[in-house]
Amino acid sequence: EVRPAALQARLADLYKVPGANLIVTRGSSEAIDALIRAWCRAYASSVITTPPTFDMYRVYAEIQGAAIIHVPLAADDFRLDADTVLSSCAADTRLVFLCSPNNPTGTLVPEADILRIADGLDGRAIVVVDEAYIEFAERESIADAALGRNNVVVLRTLSKAYALAGARCGVAIAAEPLIDVMSKVLPPYSFPTPVVETVLEALSPKRLSASRATVDEIIRERTRVRSALDALPCVNNTWPSDANFVLARFADLPGVVAYLRSRGILIRDFGDTDGLRSCARITIGAAAENDALLDALDAFGGSG
Ligand SMILES: *Cc1c(COP(=O)(O)O)cnc(C)c1O
């Protein structure tokens, strides 16, 4: 098959959108790459990103030779300023990447802000809403609103809530004219049959309800872990999260990272990233794993 029809039908059902409004990609990463290749010309186009955020927008923009306009999130609470995004859009800007919930801050972009940006850029640029973590959020996908517009693309993936990153499967959801353009730049015959079988099996009713139970547990645990972190002397700050991780600022980040590693626990060090000084992203696991992390941080002790 040129495009995997069975997967497309199954994923349209999963994400509750018409099949014609969805295209299957090898993870959302391939969708990001395809969008940039479809709409950006080398050395003649730009994209907007809102750091600190997912690094792949930058990686694929650089591969294509697209310039990157940075509109940083607020330093204290990582809120996005819709007006600054709108005023930063240049004549050559083709795509605006909004990650909601944002990796690695966990921040959800309010739906009203996303739609205000999209409507403000109608006819000028496409807003890409990366919803890799939306299953962990208190809000539904923005897909319905996207389908009523000609310049919004929503990205979903099986890599996070379905723990299927190795299968490389995601989708882009958008109005048909946008899907048609993406279908022209995505390579044909790119889904191996074993991948199709693995994904369909992972979306069987039994496996699906197990995934949903895991997501519910992670959401419950996220609240518990965050309050426990806030009570530890080595933690200076945490932020509310709508994803399967919590961002925390430590008094002694290198010390904490090294100590946890010595006990077999890995957290993602963002200390070198602009806007994330002394911060790490802590992925929420099952209760026992989270307890191991909290015990270790307790044993690490003081404020540095
Ligand atoms: C993990 C992730 C993705 C994509 O992962 P794929 O495995 O390529 O689907 C996309 N966006 C964000 C923000 C992510 O964290």
Image: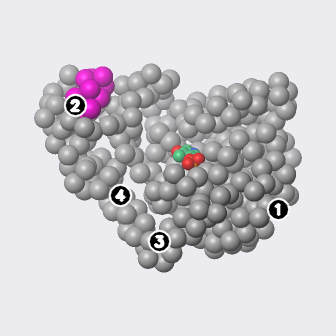
Going from the N terminus, do you reach mark 3 or mark 1 first? 1
Q: Which residue is mark 1?
A: 176
Q: Residue 204 at what x, y percent from top left?
A: 51, 75
Pick the residue in front: 243 or 171: 171
**Disc marking residue 218:** 4
Residue 133 visible in rendering: no
Q: Residue 248 at what x, y percent from top left?
A: 34, 36
Alpha carbon separation for disc pair 4 and 1: 35 Å
Which secondary structure, mark 4?
helix
Q: Amino acid at mark 3?
A: Leu
Pick the residue in front: 188 or 35: 188
Outermost residue on the bottom side: it is 205
Q: Quadrant of residue 294?
A: top left
Whether pointer 4 and pointer 3 mark residues with C-beta atoms closer than 8 Å, the reply is: no
Q: Amino acid at mark 2?
A: Ser
> Tell me, what colour scheme is on the image?
one colour
**Disc marking residue 208:** 3
Q: In the rendered view, would you say 68 is above or below 287?
A: above
Which secondary structure, mark 3?
helix
Which secondary structure, mark 2?
helix
Whether pointer 2 and pointer 4 mark residues with C-beta atoms closer than 8 Å, the reply is: no
